[in-house]
Amino acid sequence: MDKTGNTFNSAAYGGPGWQGRTRTHREEIGDLWTASGIDSEYATLRSVLLHRPGGELAAALEDPNSVQMLEALDLGRAGEQHDAMAEAYRANGVDVQYVDPAGQPTPNQMFCADLFVMSPEGAILARPASTVRAGEERWVARRLADAGVPILRTMTGNAVFEGADLMWLDPETVMVGLGLRTNEDAAAQIASSMEEIGVETLAVDMPYGTMHFMGMLRIVDRDLAICWPRRTPFSTVRALEERGYEILWLPTSEPDSVLNRALNIVTLGPRKILMLAGYDAVQKAYEKAGIECVTIDGSELVKAAGAIGCLTGVVRRDLVG
């Protein structure tokens, strides 16, 4: 402003001294925003978001089914196993952050994979499909924001979406599983946001009676995917094959309960996974395919109808695109 009070041509109004923002949003991640984002399911894992279960699990003691769990859990043992999982991440160079919701969380808050997914430009928040879990995404949104992770999208309207229903096939393609936990409205909203950042979204129907897409497909390297026979959608397998993936089929000699838990893994890096201990036949199949297996005991946690993959919200992997 000059002596007459004229503001024209001052820096605040675009005059000399104005410093325009020239970098893209993606270029500012890792600088103005914290380093975060993924564009694959297999690149080296750098950061995860967890919630350590506690007293909220008492709600499952009398009627586990009422809170979507399978059996009552031993609270102390569940917490100890969760701590061991977190330590396994740290031992493999992964930064561990916690949701830490205010007050008493709902019983399923620990299943962080369901509550968001990451893109190279920020998080897409989930909107869980059941009233038992409604609002859990709020605490994840708060924690991500506190950590400096940008929020790319929040589900609106009648959309319901859980993060375990979205998988990155390659840096240009995600696949969304439609079923009990994720509907067409959510898939359309995800597709809109992904299109804006140059990513195609493929939607696929999942078999009735299944929970999440991640329960039938896990990707452990740029050319190796693990699939569940007669459960993985035909179009999913075709999309993987078109992108050069070899399919490692789970051994059909094992019962469904074993396959479900043995597939509930997190990829630590190319052909290296964190999985539950005690599923020897499946582990041998993994190792025969050249996959290094880091194991932990999750025998108490699985009573809540989830395991390592469900418990882990992936915040950052090395980008491959």
Image (cartoon, helix red, strand yellow):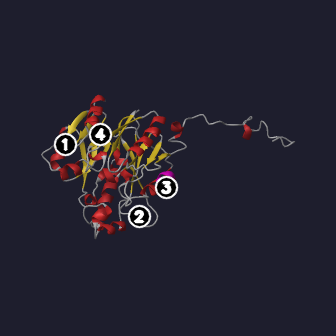
- The mark found on residue 250 in the picture is 1
Magenta residues span 141-145
Mark 2 residue type: Pro
Q: Pointer 3: residues within 10 angstroms few (<14), some, or many (20+)?
A: some
Q: Tell me which label, 4 or 3, sits earlier in the chain.
A: 3
Sequence-wise first label, 1 or 2: 2
Per the image, the residue denoted by label 2 is: 105
Q: Earlier in the sequence, mark 3 or mark 2?
A: 2
Q: Is residue 101 above or below residue 165?
A: below
> Quick one: 304 or 280, which is closer to the camera?
304
Of pointers 4 and 1, the one earlier in the residue sequence: 4
Give the distance between the C-alpha atoms of the residues marked 1 and 2, in whole angstroms: 35 Å
Q: Residues within 10 Å of mark 1 (few under 14, many from 20)?
A: many
Give the SS element for disc 1: loop
Where residue 74 appears, x then y in whole percent? Answer: 27, 67
Please, what is the three-letter code of the amino acid marked with disc 4? Ile
- Amino acid residing under circle 1: Leu
Circle 3: residue type: Arg
What separation in Å lies between label 4 and label 2 (alpha carbons)?
A: 31 Å
Give the SS element for disc 4: strand
Q: Which mark is residue 142?
A: 3
Which residue matches tag 4?
219
Q: Is residue 42 visible?
A: no
